[in-house]
Image (cartoon, rainbow, N blue to C red):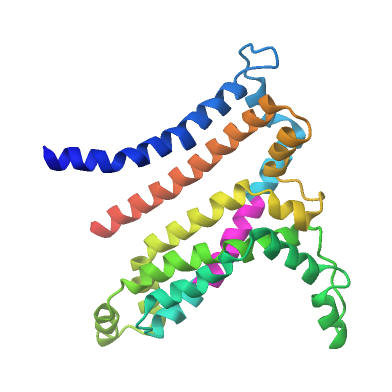
Amino acid sequence: MINRFRTSFLAAPYAVWVLICTILPLFYILGYALTNDAGGFTLANLLAITDAVHLKSLWLSIEVAFVTTIICLIIAYPVALILHNLKITNKGFVVFLFILPMWMNFMLRILAWQIILSNNGILNSILSAIGLPTVHILYTKAAVTLGMVYDFLPYMILPIYNALSKVSDSVVEAAADLGANWWTTFIKITVPLSKDGIISGIIMVFVPALSSFVVSNLLGGGKVLLIGNVIEQEFTLARNWNLGSGLSIILMIFVLLSMSIMNRIDDSENGGMLV
């Protein structure tokens, strides 16, 4: 009884924080989403997602988030595998290396990519110096995707590296002793055992990429309109909090659905492995 009271007492500050910073704001946004300017009930703010402009922005956001997640996975898994194979004793140092860039201000990091990708920037200067044609990708979907990959890549590497660190070397060695080559061992042992890290990384990259608007503002130059940009403009420029809240609720539903799908995939694969 005393231990239960002590646990509840220690959890109380967190419960208060969740109530004030998560639950109450969510109900506040939901209230705006379900009302019009006069305060009357309406579903128009939610159904506004079916407008051509909003629907186009939503699908573009899904596309960019999907491509960003795939690129991050393709880059992150080999990096995490190499770090794991290096057998670094101080794993905290590896985590520190990937967290270190996050200590720099987010805006400064994205603004640096503006300088790199601009027509007269560092990238084109290097291409001109070696005799290659210059590229003009700033304020395009490619620039936005590149910025998101740069920003969210650590969130893919860390969970995969953490999952690989839990894979016992004896399991891999046993597969080799039984005649499995490197590729077979990688596909049938290493990847399945690191699946939890892969799924965690996918969720940690896809969800923020889907709702991002700062990267597309800075690297898209207003030409790449994601659903996050539409919501941000409704709140700051149009001052239409009702519509902005309605679109925010729809976006949150998409985020929850994507997380639910990934969790179902995780559960089904775990069930299959147990069988």
Tell me the residue at 82%/50% (across/down).
223
Residue 55 drawn at (x, y percent)? 70, 37
Name the magenta segment's main secondary structure: helix
Residue 118 drawn at (x, y percent)? 84, 68
Which of the 4 quarters of the picture holds residue 233? top right
Q: Is residue 146 visible?
A: no
Q: Residue furthest left?
A: 1
Of the pair 38 and 189, the residue shown nearer to us:
38
Q: Is residue 235 left or right of residue 190?
A: right
Query: How many badges with numbers are in the image?
Result: 0
User: Residue 74 colored magenta?
Assistant: yes
Tell me the residue at 80%/69% (across/down).
115
Quarter of the figure with the N terminus: top left
Residue 176 drawn at (x, y percent)? 29, 85
Which of the 4 quarters of the picture holds residue 114? bottom right
Tell me the residue at 51%/62% (across/down).
155
- Asked if residue 117 is positioned above or below residue 245 in the image, the reply reads below
Residue 211 drawn at (x, y percent)? 61, 46
- Asked if residue 164 is positioned above or below residue 207 in the image, the reply reads below
- Asked if residue 146 is positioned above or below residue 168 in the image, the reply reads above
User: Residue 202 colored magenta?
Assistant: no
Which of the 4 quarters of the picture holds residue 189? bottom left
Quarter of the figure with the C terminus: bottom left
Of the pair 98 and 56, the residue shown nearer to us:
98
Q: Which residues are magenta?
A: 63-76
